[in-house]
Image (tube, rainbow, N blue to C red):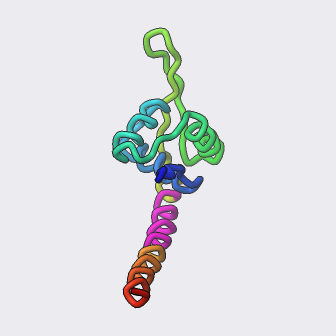
Amino acid sequence: MERNNTVSKGSIEMIILCLLREGEKYGYEMLQEIENRSGGIIRMNEGSLYVPLYRMVKEGTVTEERRIVGKRMRVYYRIEASGYNRLAELREEHETMIDGMWNLLQLDQKMSKFNK
């Protein structure tokens, strides 16, 4: 069975903010960390990362700084105070959803015992 490794919009935002909480990072660095830290389960293309990043910059939860590194321009992103607040909101929403899913899975497990 093929694994679905897509990530919801809110999850991507939360992942970005979690990474930036550790310090400023550039886009490709974040993509690599997401894949490595998830054990390869979560893989994102650049568009999936940059669209929410640009939105977050516009909203002010993240700021960007352009720097020349070698001969290349690299954009570094940094979490702002409102980003920490947004991260707390997203974590709470996700924890609530995970609790609900866990309850459903346990109910499903109990019901399967009765159906045998």
Residues 59 and 55: in front is: 55
Residues 115 and 12: in front is: 115
Q: Which residues are magenta?
A: 86-98
Q: Main secondary structure of the magenta part?
A: helix
- The answer to whether 39 appears left or right of 1 in the picture is left
Per the image, is 96 magenta?
yes
Is residue 56 positioned above or below 116 on the image? above
Determine the residue located farthest toward the front in the rendered image. Answer: 116
Residue at 49%, 36% (x, y): give it.
77
Residue 51 x %, y %: 63, 40
Determine the residue located farthest toward the top in the rendered image. Answer: 71
Residue 9 x %, y %: 59, 53
Determine the residue located farthest toward the bottom in the rendered image. Answer: 114
Residue 38 x %, y %: 37, 47
Residues 1 and 24: in front is: 1
Asked if one can make out residue 24 in the rendered structure from this viewpoint, the answer is yes
